[in-house]
Image: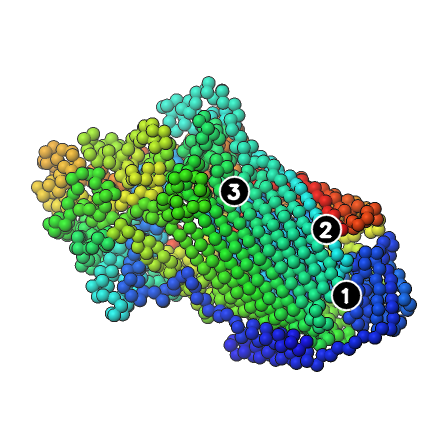
Amino acid sequence: MAYFLQQVQRVTLLICCVVGTSLTISAQTKPLINSHLSGRVMDAQTKEPLPGAAVQIQGTTHGVITDQQGKFSFVTGQPFPYTLIVTYTGYKKLEIVANNPNIDIALEVLQSQLNDVVVVGYGTKKKSDLTGAISSVNNNLFKQPVSSIDQALKGSVPGVQVVQTSGQPGGGVSIRVRGGSSIQGGNEPLYVIDGFPVYNSTTNAGTTSGTPINPLASINPADIENIDILKDASATAIYGSRGANGVVIVTTKKGRADRSNISWESSYGVQSLRKKIDVLNAQEFAILRNEVLFDTNPAKGPNQYLSNEEVAKLGKGTDWQDAAFRSGNIQNHQLTISGGSAKTRYLLSGNYFTQEGIIRHTDFNRISLRANIDAQPYERLKISSSITASKSDANIAPSGIVSSLLLMPPTATIYEPNGSYTLRNPFENIFANPIATLNEQLNKSTTNRFFGTAFGELKVIEGLHVKVLLGADVNTTNEKLYIPSTIYEGTQTGGAAGRGNYSSYSWLNENTITYNKNIGRHAFDVLGGFTQQEFNSDVVRTGAEKFVTDQLKYNSLQSGATLVRPFSNTTSWVLHSWLARVNYTYDNRLYLTASIRTDGSSRFGKGNKWGYFPSAAVSWRIGNEDFFKRYKQTISDLKLRASFGVTGNLEIGEYQSLATLYSVTYIIGNKILTGFTPNRIANDQLGWETTDQYNAGIDVGLWNNRVLVTLDGYYKKTRNLLLNVELPWTSGQASSLQNFGSVENRGIEIGINSKNFVGDFTWSTDFNFSLNRNKVLSLGNGAKQYITGNYIIQVGQPLGSFYGTVTNGILQTGEEKDKGAFTGNAAPKPGDRLYKDINKDGTFTTAADRAIIGNAQPNFLAGIQNHFSYHGVSLSVFFQGSFGNKILNGNRQSLELFTGQQNAAGSARDRWTATNPSQTIPRAKLDPAPIFSDRFIEDGTFVRLKNIALSYDISRNWLHNIAGIQVYVSAQNLLTWTKYTGFDPEVTSGSNVSPGTDAGIYPVAKTFNAGIKVSF
Amino acid sequence: MKKLGILFLIICMGSIQGCSSLDENPQSDIVTNQFYQNESQADAAVIAAYRKLYETGQSLYNSLFQIGVEMATDDYEAGPRARNAHVRAISGLTHDASNDRMEQLWKQSYDAINTSNIAIERIALIGETHINGTVRTRLINEAKFLRALHYFNLVRWFGDVPLVLHEVNSLEANGLYVEKSPSSEVYAQIIKDLQDAENLPAPGAYSAANIGRATSGSAKSLLAKVYLTQQNWTLAAAKSREVIEAKWYDLFENFADVYAVGRKNGKEHIFSAQFLGNAGYQGNSLASRSAPNEVPGINGDYADAIHKQGGLYESFSENDTRKAVTFSTSLVSPTDGKTYTFEPHLHKYYDESVVGNQGQSSKNLPIIRYAEVLLIYAEALNESSGAPSTAAYEAIDKVRARAGIALLKDIAPNLGKDAFRDSVFQERRKELVYEYQRWFDLVRRGPDYYVKTLKAAGKTLAAPKHIRFPTPQRELNLNPKLKQDPLWL
């Protein structure tokens, strides 16, 4: 390996030398003036001028940009006639011969999307030339008011599942590209933002409670120009050990070389809870509690909680949901200034985004700045930088709030009669008054992030470019927590303050060489390079308890009487990579791509540092074959694609191969002493998770490419899973991270983009459909299954399988003897729930009588977006759906414990009583141990009007000095069709082993939004 | 342009030559092979072994014993707040091999044993110039004492168990998969380790900074208990007599002093789990688990219940000074000043200095104390002869006298062997409640006695198999050499 590296180093050095010397022979000559040319560029149909179109004289580097009236002029050394190349985004490129000093140029609107440029790893490609499976996200979706870009990906493209893991403003999102393939490693895709690879792992210091803020929320979504998602191995293998979960390439907006443009956009929205959960009111609850106490202790009579008269006076009591949920405002203001000349282009933007959560005292806001600059200081050199800095602040809902809101008894009040907070649930299940927590507990997170890349690209000779890219990502998260002594959580400690700081920096250096050459019908495009990235993170946490006053909050830790043990930790990783790719095209008919990346990562065992990730792909554009010409009237384009490649996954954290020690403390001599003991057994052989992926696809263009259909089928097998292989506890360890086992994902994806109407009235439709089937093939070590909580990972079954008991009706009067053993109770009574005796041993136990009772993965996902426009009015309607997935409704499981110790679901009204022998709802009783059963597995299928937006473009002809005004109204999550009884089917846990659980998750909101965009 | 070319050249060369290393050198962690080099690191290895008496959360001597073991006796049942199905299963004797608390007993004990094994083996390898020979022997013997203690627990809970005596530091199957050893072999190892530990410093020989470590007295007392459990009455009597005659220990005059924060590691304490409030996760959480939740400002987390029908509370006579120390039935709320009365709650570990935050109780948990040695002596003497001797009476009566109740020799001077045995067990129950002895005492008397006692206390599902815990199913699944206890097949 070392030898190989040396060789590659030598070759790279050699190339660098060539670059260096070739430059010395460059020379420049002064131009002579031979002609003057002036002209105008306009829309062929509307005859409206097109400002900002690029006009270039063929065979030279001389180019200009049209002004506001679409006019341009040249003073050039070229004598007439010469050819002009005119380009303008959204229009067909035109080559036109200029014979005399005046020319009018009319551009045709681009009908086909096939000429769109797609950003691929380390380069760009025309969509028509792709060999792999890459989807571009319709940028209409970025217009939704979202705090982070990943939220805008929902339902956007086939093969991508987006699950919001919290409705907390700035909260997290979990994304699976073509299914989850790792069990214990990370499953999130790699984000490449302006060339900088980022794995979106949480960056919290661990001080605050509740959902950590999504790190991607520090990147302003309004700055994004486009998002391309690389799915198959031919596309992702160039990212090697980080490509297995797919790659999301994010490109931010650049200045255009037209007149300066200033645009201001403001939007304002209101969010609200989509639906409340039906729970008992005070009177109903009191009756239930009386019933439970009577059942537990009959000797004390039927009114141990409240007398009938007291119950009658109760009324509805406190509605804790109403007390906590509110309508929250959301605002977004963006100022963008862009422009430039042919040689320098710039884009500056400032953004302020603020979102109040639909739960009191929760919010997120962000201020961000961006400066993107592209310049060509020398004829052969291009430089570019893309830099953003942002500050985000969040008030986070403390964990457990949502469950407490549901479970807090309606007979309890927010305040005691004396005006102080009711501390907690007055009954046996102790939890704090959630309103007091929301009002008084401070749980803040502030993130400052600087993120930027810069590159220089040098043209060595025609077709040969050397590019050096540098990038930095500097992130600091400050967390502050204060729990005052006046609320229940603070009563034990007398006030608790915490401060935490997470800081990380990551730097990147990429050196690539590209060479393009066309020889007759053969076109080559070669890429080679070396990249390195290093990441360092640092966490410090400290705190104090027992404060004399709550006034100082977290600002004076030294005044706490009790100090909390401080914590600090630092980690780093390094990744070195060599990459190479060859694209070969024969006559625009046959395309071949081959790539290889080798990655060396510090994360792996010393015997297994380097991995190799090759890929190959071929596509055949039948549409360009002669024999196909007769079908062209209908089938304007047809392409077949096939690819195979190997990618990896290294998301396991640092130092996992080493037998590190951890520190513990014990008391000797009544003093604290520190001890050290190993926390794992070393594994020198720890290596990558390897994913082999096969992909076959077909791209069809119909009716002059007005309809484009893309169909892909894939098979992904991930082997050498990074698995915490369970060890016998007799070893002193519970598990060891090893490469064991495999998982497969198979699927089909369909994408249809259709321009149904073109002309004055346009109507376009984007449709996507994806189906993924996941299966665990082996778990290594002879293991057939692992049970973790309510889930089972079993060979032959998909990940996300729920494992629980199966209900079997309700024990009725007189059945105690025959069926009592199936209640799981030592002393069964009529009204107890019956369960199936799955192991057929004649009795029911919660541990032994379980089965797979559903799966969190959807059968298929679909999204459809329709976009209509007519004379500046446009309407966009986006539906999204998930079908066949199951959700574990954890809130309901807690609410259906009719113990009288906490509030109960509305279904308690139909509970079994002697006079209401229900077959589905059990009786009220004390037993507070929840039994996980199929009762709480619900159909998570939903179809949702994700986004509807109506906008009006006030024509620029009306207004002087203002280039355009756009006003719009939109709504998100306006309509939802689902049978799911929880808050929202879209928000569930997103982890690999336990997806699809909705327990105490911050619900997602329904939003109405209105905005205006003015361009000058 | 020339300058540009040179610049690119420099960047390309620099970046390739300037690679940072792919080797991992953690800054915040020590790697095993860099450690265990000198005396202070040797001590850290032993401190870690002590720490395994209880780690964070529900751990062996910090309430797991209560939840995972004592719940299956006539003294306790899962209270109205015990929300965990596994805990309720133990209480109702419907537990099976997948019971997570019993899994934890197994897991945490072996974790502790592994930590002791590491100390025993690695300390022996430290170069002579880096550690004082006496300290080396002492540290190794401390670890052996701890290893013996955990094996003694394991063999009583699970019967035959795998006997792991070396650090497991590779993923080779041979080291990972160990078959069960007969309990006789496990006992032999326990005795061997404790005999080595008898060479530890005598009680009182440690400097103040080392108080709380195992002593020769700890080893001898535990050894007496091991012999007693084995029904090796002669050796049990001899070993407990040795402890008594050494005069290292005595009873506190006042029973409350046994649990007083100011009297920790006093004359009656032989070996205790050491707790300290507000010092990280070092508080005795049994205190908060046993504090009532209905008293404002106490913030109790009470989830267990003293079994009413078992009559433990009622079995204390009113003049028994242990009653008020062991239980509370009323408390004054620190919030509203009112007095609240409630069903009897355990009170032994309730720390008055942290009212409202009992999770930070600084009270130690006695693992073995002198009163128990006296009771071991009384029991062993009784069993090894035809009828209880005067010495046996004297031993039990010392405990009764301190409790302020009538002496046995006065109220029942002519007890037969069986009746005396019952008296000793009844005394153990009252004296040692919440010191995790009850389950061991019940099963020591055999399945019939256990089943009869539990049924009488209303736990109708009690069966002979309950005198042992099932080998965790997880371990059976992972380790092909392991077989389930025949009682549980």
Secondary structure under badge 2?
A: strand
Q: Please state the horizontal and vertical placement of residue B283, each as a whole percent of the image.
A: 32, 45
User: Label 1 belongs to which residue?
Assistant: A622
| Residue on which the image places disc 2 | A263
What's the residue at 52%, 37% (across, down)?
A892
On the same chain, marks 1 and 3? The answer is yes
Q: What residue does disc 3 label?
A: A397
- Tell me the kind of residue under disc 2: Ser
- On the question of residue A605 being in view, the answer is yes
Q: Secondary structure at mark 1?
A: helix
Going 25% across and 40% down the picture, which residue do you hit? B433
Q: Position of residue A556 (x, y in %)?
A: 43, 46
Mark 2 and mark 3 in contact? Answer it, CB < 8 Å. Answer: no
Q: Chain of mark 3?
A: A
Q: Position of residue A408 (x, y in %)?
A: 48, 33
Q: Give whichever of discs 1 and 3 has the lower sequence position.
A: 3
Circle 3: element type: loop
Q: Of the residues tagged 1 and 3, which is closer to the observer? A: 3
Of circles 2 and 1, the one toward us is: 2
